[in-house]
Image (cartoon, helix red, strand yellow):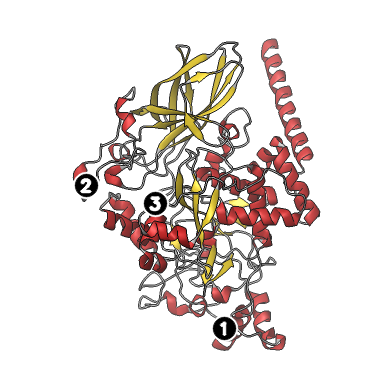
Amino acid sequence: MTRGRTACGAALLALLALVSQACDARRASGARPDADRWSEAGLLSEGARFLDDPTFRRVALVESLTNPKNTYSSERLSSYGLRTKGWDLLPEWNPRSVVLTSSMAEAAREGRTPVVEPHTLPLWDGARPRDMAEWIALGREVFFRFPLRKEPVIQWALAHPPLGAKAGVRPAADGSYPGVVAFVDTRGESQIGMTCAICHADVDHGLVVVGQARRTFDFGSLRLAYHADTKTFVEADLARRMRTWGPGRADVTEDDEEDPVAIPDLWGLRHQTFLTQAGTLQHTGVAALAIRQETQLLTSNHHAVRPPRELALALAFFLYSIRPPPRALAETHPSDLAPGRAIFARRCASCHSNAAWGGDLVPAAEVDTDRALANGAGRGTGHYRPAALVRVASAAPYFHDGAVATLEDVLSSARFDVTYARGFLGPGPVGGHAYGTELPPADRDALLKFLRAL
Amino acid sequence: MPVSVAIASAHLGAEGCTHDESSGGTKSSAAGSVSATKCATPLPDASPQGTGLCGGPCDFSSAQLSFVSASPSTTHVQIGDVALLDADTGMELQALSAYTPLVWDGTQYSPWDENVSPFSQIKTSYTLSPPAWSMLGPSFTYSHQYQVRITVLVDGVALPLESPPLTRPARLST
């Protein structure tokens, strides 16, 4: 009995000590949201903690994971921020990487792998940026130049320019290929790779639009064409799945569900309270996004290396800095938008509530669009994040999976009908997100006018 | 133990992605378990880096290990058994092998003789023979979690290590 009490008391003391340590860590880390957190000074302060305080990084990771049980979360919980084991022990890789030039593309067209010149310096000079402008400048380099592994399919696309261009691998007016790099890999060999920009920067009439989803990028069809041309093996199930992706969509989850997502624009990311369409991460602060980027650059490079944390933080700051391009439509007089604004406030703003017109998570059962992603083992949370509506008029196709081709059809009950034939993924009804579909035509038109002005 | 070792990461790649060296591994390689008849026209495997099943783009399996020496003398290390485990049950699913030891030189991974210098700390990488995913049962899917057990021999003394739970990479890893 006495021994039992002693053991119990010791266990209680140990537990209290753990709780106390956790509280101390939280206090020390400042991981709780505070009013100043999103100011420039607050962001830089939190960024410094992300870089220099391992306890803070671990706390920030844990706080950011919406559903700790999905495979995305469990992989990070078992490997990130553990100091004496796991990913903290990986070497830092500061790659020598250049955006593919027209002459390099010419080499690729001739079947040669472009060689990175020996004098090419690493992406980062090792000096920590001193202010936000320098962080953003460094983050831009990461966005365009940090490889997400070598990618033979992109190299094949360069050797087949018409097919490559059709699938979104095309140059800007200066001949460079945003999102495609020649780099020296972790074994010292020159390779072709892809970067964040292959999905999140578009080329519009030769101009690079940073943050705009490259909705022509069709990785599935490119890879299928690669296999067909090179007569190389591809799993039958993977081939079948890739045929369903189409342009601007891919299945990026670590699970069995067929849940390809439409590439999202990055406008207003700073204001999103959750990251990924399924809200896999709570965007509690810049550390949450920096950890997302750090681990993404690590896993996409086959877990062999990790990026310098400065580069992950810089990328996060750069993503916050991205601004949308001018509206495609002519500016509308505010008084013309008033009716639609009022309808939006009444019918939409409870979900699309933040400064980017996105919002907090909504149960997938309530939204009732395709639930595979929200309930998937990979990144699922049981919820969806209301999409940001900045430049929504240019963001087709709509819904997380890109199922609806036009903004008009998002707000039309016609898409519920079995005869509906305008779906982006093919004929047949497209259910879910019934909000707004019951509006009288005049109200719907007013709402559309307002949405087109966002 | 004069040298401590920890698993930094492990990566479960695509079936059939192997280098030529793996055929001499300590365990039989799972490569080639998918019938060659499934390949349209197998390409000659001329690349020293290996090209995967029938020449397709490859996602190699690997393990990254960190060694810290507290020894005043050079210590030889080696990888013994490697196994793919079911993370739920701990059951061994397949024997794998480790080959091509590399060490991080500050810039890249370079060939390594598996000797750990006195009082040094090094980061290393081994290619693993690929899991034969097609030979596993239907429940061993992309959603399932696995572990890799690696037995490291430090001056001949066996040191078993287990990776954290792992999944197969997404079909398009981002």
Residue at the spot 63% in from the left edge and 73% down from the top edge = A325
Q: Position of residue B125 (x, y in %)?
A: 48, 31
Q: Chain of mark 2?
A: B
Using residue A97 as the reference point, say whether residue A19 is left or right of it. Answer: right
Image quadrant containing the C terminus of chain A? bottom right
In this rendered view, identify the residue nearer to me: A396 or A415. A396
In this rendered view, identify the residue nearer to me: A108 or B40. A108
A35 over B71 or under it: above or below: below
Residue A200: name its quadrant: bottom right
Q: CA distance from mark 2 to mark 1?
A: 53 Å
Q: Which residue is under mark 2?
A: B38
Q: Position of residue A98 (x, y in %)?
A: 54, 53
Mark 2 is surrounded, within 10 Å at the Cα level, by few (under 14), some (14 to 19) or many (20 or more) other residues, namely: some
Amino acid beneath label 3: Pro
Label 3 and label 2 in one chain: no
Q: Position of residue B171 (x, y in %)?
A: 41, 50
Check contact, mark 3 vs mark 2: CB within 8 A. Answer: no
Q: Chain of mark 1?
A: A
Q: Secondary structure beneath disc 1?
A: helix
Q: Which residue is under mark 1?
A: A444
Check contact, mark 1 vs mark 3: CB within 8 A. Answer: no
Q: Earlier in the sequence, mark 1 or mark 3?
A: 3
Using residue A8 as the reference point, say whether residue A159 is left or right of it. Answer: left
Amino acid beneath label 2: Lys
Q: Which residue is under mark 3?
A: A152
Residue at the spot 46% in from the left edge and 60% down from the top edge = A103
